[in-house]
Image (cartoon, grey):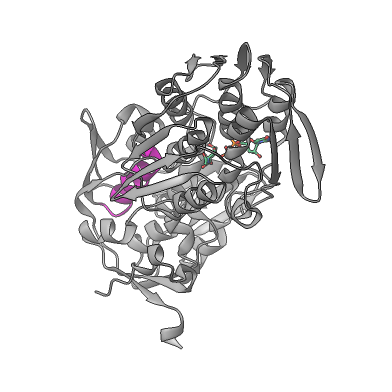
Amino acid sequence: MIFKTACLLTGGDPSKLELFVNNRTRLTGEVTVSSSKNAILPILAASLLTDEEVQIDRVPSIKDVIIITELIHNLGSGIEKKENKIIFRAAQVGTSPDYELVRQIRASFLVAGPLLARHGAIKIALPGGCAIGTRPIDLHLKGFRALGAGIGLSGGNVIASSSGLKGNHIYLDFPSVGATENIMMAAALAKGTTYIENAALEPEVVDLANFINTMGGRISGAGRNVIRIEGVKRLHGSHYTAIADRIEAGTYMVAAAATGGDITIKNVIPEHVKAVTAKLIESGAQVAEGRDKIRVKRDGAIKPLYLKTLPYPGFPTDMQAQFMAYLSCADGSSVITESVFENRFMHVPELSRMGAKIKAESRTAIIKGVKELSGTRVKATDLRAGAALLIGALMAKGTSIISNSEHIDRGYENIVDKLNGLGADIYRQEEESRH
Ligand code: UD1
C-alpha cells in the first residue's frame, strides 16, 4: 500500500493526486470522527469579533480549514498553531479579505458579519456559484441591511458600511445556515436586540451561538426557529472545541452499511444523525446507539428508499450523494429528491460509469438497484460527490480510480488512513507518475 498524503498539508499540489480503491471491501472496526467542518469554519470566522486571544482545540486538518485560517491570517490576525490547536489574536485586522482566498471557498463569506460588526465596513468578493448551484447571498445581505448597513455591489465585490449596527427583526425567506450564522455574528456586537425569524436549526448554528456566548455574547434560542441576539459592547477571548462532524459520521455509517460491514463510529452525537440512522434502519441496516458512539452493520439485502433532503432536522443534503451510491445496489428502485440545492446530482454520471442505473431529472433521481458496481475511472466534482464515489468504489468489484480527490480532502480528515484502518485498500498516486 502506498501512502502519499503528506503533500496535502505541506504545499504539494493535491489536485495532481488520484485515489486508487482496490476491490470490494467489507469495512469493520472502529473509526473516530473529527470536529465538524461546518461548525469550525464559522467559529474561526467569529474569532475576528474580538481583539483578545481565542484558542480552538481539535481543529481538523482539512483543506477548507486551512484556507479560512490563511484568510484570517491574511487579514492581520496573529496565528499560532500547536499540534491540532490554533490560537488567534485579531488585535488589528483589515476590512478587505484576500480575493483569491475568498473565491476558493464559499464559507469565506462568513468573515463578512464579524468584520462588519467590528469595523462597520467590509469589501469582500462575491463568493460566486459552485458545482452544486448558484448559491446566492441575498439573505446574508438582507440581514446586514436590516441591521443598518449600507450595501453596494461593485466590480464583483460586496461593499458594506455602517456607522453602527442596530438590532432588528429579520425574517429569513429560507432557513439558510450561512445567513443565520453571518447575521448572528454581525448582531452580536450591534446596539440593541436582534431576532432572526425562520432561522436555520442546524447543530452548527447552535455551536456557533455557544461559542459566541463563551466570548461574552448574549444569544438565546439557537436551535429553535427564532434566535434572539442581545448585542454587547465587546466580546472577549475564549477557549473552545467544536462539536463532532455529523456528516463525517454519517458518511462512515453509510460506508458500513454499503459494504455489508460492521463499524463502530466514535465521537458522534447520535441526536445529530437521527435522520441518517432512521433511513439506514429503513434500508435494512442495524444501528445501535451509545452515548457518543454508533455501531452500524448490515448483512441482509439493501431495501430501496424514498428520501428527500430538507433543512435540519430533515435528511441532510450533505448525505444525499453517499446514500445514492449505497442505494445503487438496493433490491429495487429508490427515489431521491434534492430540495435544498438546485444542482446537486453531479455524482449521477460518475456513479453510472460504475454501473449504477440512475435517472435524474430536475431535483429527482430514480435509482434502480443493480447487483454490483464495477471499478472504473471516475471524477470527484465536489466534496460529498467525492465521498459518494469512495463509497461506490468500496462496494465495487475491481479497482476504481477517483480523480480530483482534492475535493474529498476539503472536508474529511485523514479519510484514506481512516478507511484503510477499517480494512479498505486505498492509496494515492500522483497523476504524472502514471504517464
Ligand atoms: C451550509 C453548509 C453546507 C450545507 C448547507 C445546507 C457550511 C460551511 N456549509 O452551506 O455544507 O450543504 O449549509 O445544509 O456550513 N440561499 C439563498 N440565499 C442566501 C443563502 C442561501 O437563496 O442568501 C439558498 C442556497 O442557494 C441553497 C439554500 O439556501 O439553495 C441553502 O443554503 P445555505 O443553508 O445557506 O447553505 P450554506 O450556508 O451555503
**Spot occupied by residue 197 in the image (x, y as percentages of width and height):** 62, 16
**Spot occupied by residue 67 in the image (x, y as percentages of width and height):** 50, 53
Q: Is residue 220 above or below residue 313?
A: above
Please tell me whether the stretch drawn in magenta is mainly helix, strand or loop: helix
| Left or right of 46 on screen, residue 160 | right
| Left or right of 222 on screen, residue 268 | left
**Spot occupied by residue 153 in the image (x, y as percentages of width and height):** 80, 42
- Occupied quadrant, residue 166: top right
Q: Nearer the viewer, residue 75 or 425?
A: 75
Judged from this view, the residue extending furthest toward the bottom is 435
Regarding ligand 1, which quadrant of the image does it lie in? top right
- Residue 425 among those drawn in magenta: no
Image label count: 0
**Spot occupied by residue 403 in the image (x, y as percentages of width and height):** 48, 70
Judged from this view, the residue extending furthest toward the front is 92
Q: Which residues are magenta?
A: 245-260
- Residue 258 among those drawn in magenta: yes
Q: Residue at x 41, y 53 (%)?
A: 62
Q: Residue at x 26, y 52 (%)?
A: 260
Residue 100 in sight here: yes
Q: Residue at x 66, y 23 (%)?
A: 172
| Left or right of 389 on screen, residue 180 | right
Q: Is residue 192 above or below residue 125?
A: above
- Occupied quadrant, residue 195: top right
